[in-house]
Image (cartoon, rainbow, N blue to C red):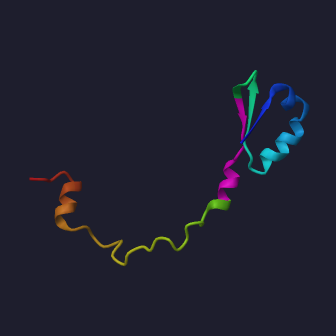
């Protein structure tokens, strides 16, 4: 992660933004003290590209929709003794 001062950020803003669009994060500092960070802006539409990335990593068990055992069902219904 690169750090630039305010003058560099103002002078090279379009170049810095191009780098941020590619995923880089850039810190802007004032007299050596970090004051801001430029990070890529992610919208909810970008989220679609991540859907399905874990496909095949989990298998739904065959008994997934079977009724719960009586003791567990009683606990869920608040009928514990």
Q: Quadrant of residue 29?
A: top right
Q: Is residue 62 magenta?
A: no
In the image, 67 versus 15, the foreground residue is: 15
Depicted 35 relative to depicted 63: above or below: above
- In-front residue for pair 81/38: 38
Q: Quadrant of residue 60?
A: bottom left
Say which residue appears at 60% left-offset and 66% top-offset.
53
Residue 12 pos. (x, y %): 89, 35
17 vs 81, left or right, is right
Q: Quadrant of residue 76?
A: bottom left
Q: Residue at x 61, y 62 (%)?
A: 51
| Magenta region, residue range | 36-48
Q: Residue at x 71, y 29 (%)?
A: 36
Q: Magenta stretch containing residue 47, yes or no? A: yes
Give above or below for 62 relative to 45: below
Q: Measuring from the top left, give residue 42's x and y in whole percent.
A: 70, 47
Q: Quadrant of the N terminus?
A: top right
Q: Residue furthest left?
A: 81
Position above or below: 13 against 78: above
Horizontal side of residue 57 vs 63, given as left or right: right
Q: Residue 4 vs residue 42: left or right? A: right
Seen in the picture, residue 49 relative to 30 is either above or below; the reply is below
């Amino acid at each position: 992660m690169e750090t630039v001062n305010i003058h560099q950020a103002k002078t090279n803003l379009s170049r810095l933004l191009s780098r941020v669009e590619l995923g880089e994060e850039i810190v802007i500092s004032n007299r050596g003290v970090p004051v801001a960070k430029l990070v890529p802006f992610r919208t909810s539409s970008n989220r679609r590209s991540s859907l399905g990335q874990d496909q095949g990593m989990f298998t739904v068990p065959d008994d997934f929709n079977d009724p719960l055992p009586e003791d567990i069902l009683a606990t869920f219904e608040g009928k514990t003794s």
